[in-house]
Image (cartoon, helix red, strand yellow):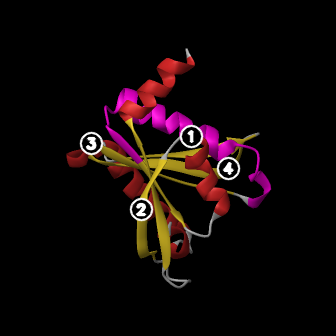
Amino acid sequence: MPWIDATESAEDTRAYLRTVMQGLAQGTEYSFAILEHGIVVGATGIRVVADAAEGEIGYWVSKDAEGRGIITRSSAALVQFAFEDLGLNRVVILCAVDNKRSRAVPERLGFSIEGTHRERDVNPSREPKDQVVYCLLRSTWDSGRSSAT
């Protein structure tokens, strides 16, 4: 999430929120704060690539809120939103290869590994890193839901 490193002032935050609102109005991005007892502990969202019928989920959570399934539950809700409300066919999640906690989320939700983007994870404060591409297809999600009922 490169915008985190670029957010240094209240005006930076306002500019980011304007971008989020513009994406929402255009139907290309849906962002949500994750609250716990009225305090923001993380954020999640989905960016839509309409011509590919695909959505990319992103997330972050504070250290204090890690390990409690918050991101897994949030991501599961976004997957349902992507397939049922947005009519998408694919949902992807990109994770740094060495980020075990982040990678556990799509693995718990039944995503498959499609491959690795080499040196794609580039943020101003760190070296380029490889990213694992996880994908869940609507057909796989539908069949998983029907076998669970």
Q: Residue at x 41, y 53 (%)?
A: 20
Q: Mark 2 sits on what residue?
A: 115
> Which residue is identified by label 3?
53
- Nearer-the-camera pick, 21 or 69: 69
Residues shaded magenta: 63-91
Q: Could you tell me residue 141's position as x and y percent?
A: 44, 31
First in sequence: mark 1 vs mark 2: 1
Q: Which residue is mark 4?
A: 40
Question: Residue at the location (27% across, 42% down)?
Answer: 53
Question: What is the CA distance from the residue labelled 3 to the residue labelled 1?
Answer: 20 Å
Which residue is at 30% across, 42% downward?
A: 27
C-alpha span from label 3 to label 4: 30 Å
Q: Which mark is residue 109?
A: 1
Q: Nearer the viewer, mark 3 or mark 1?
A: 1
Disc 3 residue type (three-letter) = Ala
Mark closest to the chain's N terminus, 3 or 1: 3
- Name the dominant secondary structure of the magenta segment: helix
